[in-house]
Image: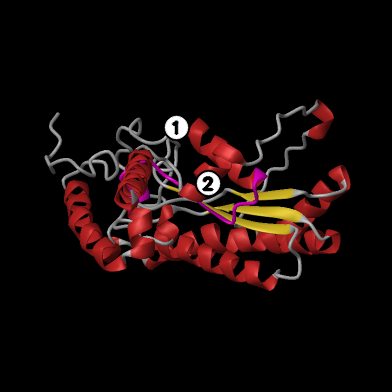
């Protein structure tokens, strides 16, 4: 009888592990976020009216204007409940070919611009004792990404800043610091990427349809914010797997990143889009 019960228990464990493995194969977000999507709070539906909307053009590079913009928002609404930092640019160039000015521009925009706006809003949230500061970082915020050394550096800086800020606010449990780390998502980020020189556009953005839909990324983000998730990984496979490997098995992650990174660089040198050609053979385009 004891052996039969043991077999049942082991079979149950095996079925559970197999089920979780299959779920992970088709997962497009980290397990904490998917749990929140299944069992947590649901994002509220919008009931905004015209008077509830105020559009304030803002230049992240013009840090001197951020105080005025914040004051205008506070005057109009009275409070700022949620700040979502979602401005920035990516990069498509080899380190050896990129001007230092490109790296400075990436840090000024992606990192310092984000920090500046956050510092304007944070004192208000501290006085209230509540609020959400959500920042769109990237998988590149904790993973090495070839052809985006400056972009990855700026996102690593963003991650370090907000991880540290979160611990500083331990006495304010109702202020949520959330970092959102998407993988490849359909957007115009590639078209607007920095290259090896300031002002030089990307030669080709390539086909972006293989990436996660913008709607799915936004939906998962809203779920994470509704459930006060501190860090979200939003990526389809195999990029989600890479996140877990970098987190828990960095030696294996380095090996695989070197293999795939070499392919990515080869495709880039051959004139192919770095993203859509990530797993394809490096063939030169013909006209």
Way the structure is coloured: secondary structure
Residue 189's place in the image compared with 124, above or below, is: above
Which residue is drawn at the image coordinates 85% and 63% (left, top)? 127
Over which residues does the magenta segment extend?
Answer: 226-241
Query: Would you say the residues marked 1 and 2 are in contact, meaning their CB atoms lie under 8 Å apart?
Result: no
Label 1 or label 2, whichever lies nearer to me, is 2
Question: Image check: 114 left or right of 81?
Answer: left
Residue wearing tag 1: 213
Which quadrant holds residue 124?
bottom right
Is residue 180 positioned above or below 210 on the image?
below
> Observer-nearest residue: 1 or 125?
1
Q: CA distance from mark 1 to mark 2?
A: 17 Å
Task: Classify the position of the C terminus by image quarter.
Answer: top left
User: How far across and how far down the image is residue 61, in percent?
Assistant: 60, 57
> Helix, strand, or loop for circle 1?
loop
State the image coordinates of residue 123 (x, y, percent, origin top left): 79, 64
Q: Which badge, 1 or 2, is on the more N-terminal residue? A: 2
Most extreme residue toward the front, as rendered? 1
Measured from the top left, where is residue 190 in percent x and y?
39, 42
Determine if the magenta segment contains residue 238.
yes
- Label 2 Cα crowd, 10 Å radius (few <14 / some 14-19 / many 20+): many
Label total for image: 2
- Left or right placement of residue 11 versus residue 76 in this view: left
SS of the residue at dot 2? helix
Do we see residue 149 in this rendering?
no
Answer whether residue 166 is magenta in the image: no
Q: Residue at x 30, y 35 (%)?
A: 206
**Residue beneath the point at 26% across and 41% down:** 273
Q: Which residue is mark 2?
A: 33
Is the residue marked by circle 1 packed among few (<14), some (14-19), or many (20+) residues within 10 Å?
some
Q: In the picture shown, does residue 50 fall above or below 86?
A: above
Residue 46, image quadrant? top right
């Amino acid at each position: 009888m004891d052996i039969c019960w043991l077999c049942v228990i082991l079979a149950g464990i095996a079925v559970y592990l197999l089920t979780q493995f299959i779920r992970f194969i088709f997962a497009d977000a980290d397990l904490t976020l998917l749990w929140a999507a299944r069992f947590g709070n649901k994002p509220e539906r919008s009931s905004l009216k015209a008077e509830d909307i105020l559009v304030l053009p803002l230049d992240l590079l013009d840090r001197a204007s951020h105080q005025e913009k914040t004051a205008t928002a506070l005057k109009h609404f009275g409070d700022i409940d949620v700040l979502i930092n979602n401005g920035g640019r990516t990069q498509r160039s080899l380190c050896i070919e990129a001007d230092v000015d490109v790296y400075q521009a990436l840090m000024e925009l992606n990192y310092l611009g984000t920090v500046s706006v956050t510092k304007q809003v944070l004192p208000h949230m501290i006085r209230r004792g509540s609020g959400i500061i959500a920042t769109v970082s990237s998988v590149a915020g904790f993973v090495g990404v070839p052809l985006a050394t400056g972009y990855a550096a700026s996102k690593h800086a963003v991650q370090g800043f907000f991880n540290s800020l979160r611990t500083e606010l331990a006495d304010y449990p109702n202020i949520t610091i959330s970092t959102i780390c998407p993988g490849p998502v359909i957007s115009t980020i590639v078209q607007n990427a920095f290259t090896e020189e300031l002002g030089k556009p990307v030669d080709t953005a390539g086909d972006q349809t293989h990436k996660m839909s913008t709607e799915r990324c936004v939906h998962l983000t809203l779920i994470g914010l509704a459930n006060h998730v501190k860090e979200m990984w939003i990526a389809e496979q195999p990029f989600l797997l890479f996140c877990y490997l970098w987190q828990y098995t960095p030696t294996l992650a380095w090996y695989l990143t070197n293999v795939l990174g070499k392919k990515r660089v080869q495709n880039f040198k051959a004139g192919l889009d770095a993203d859509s050609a990530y797993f394809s053979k490096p063939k030169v385009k013909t006209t």
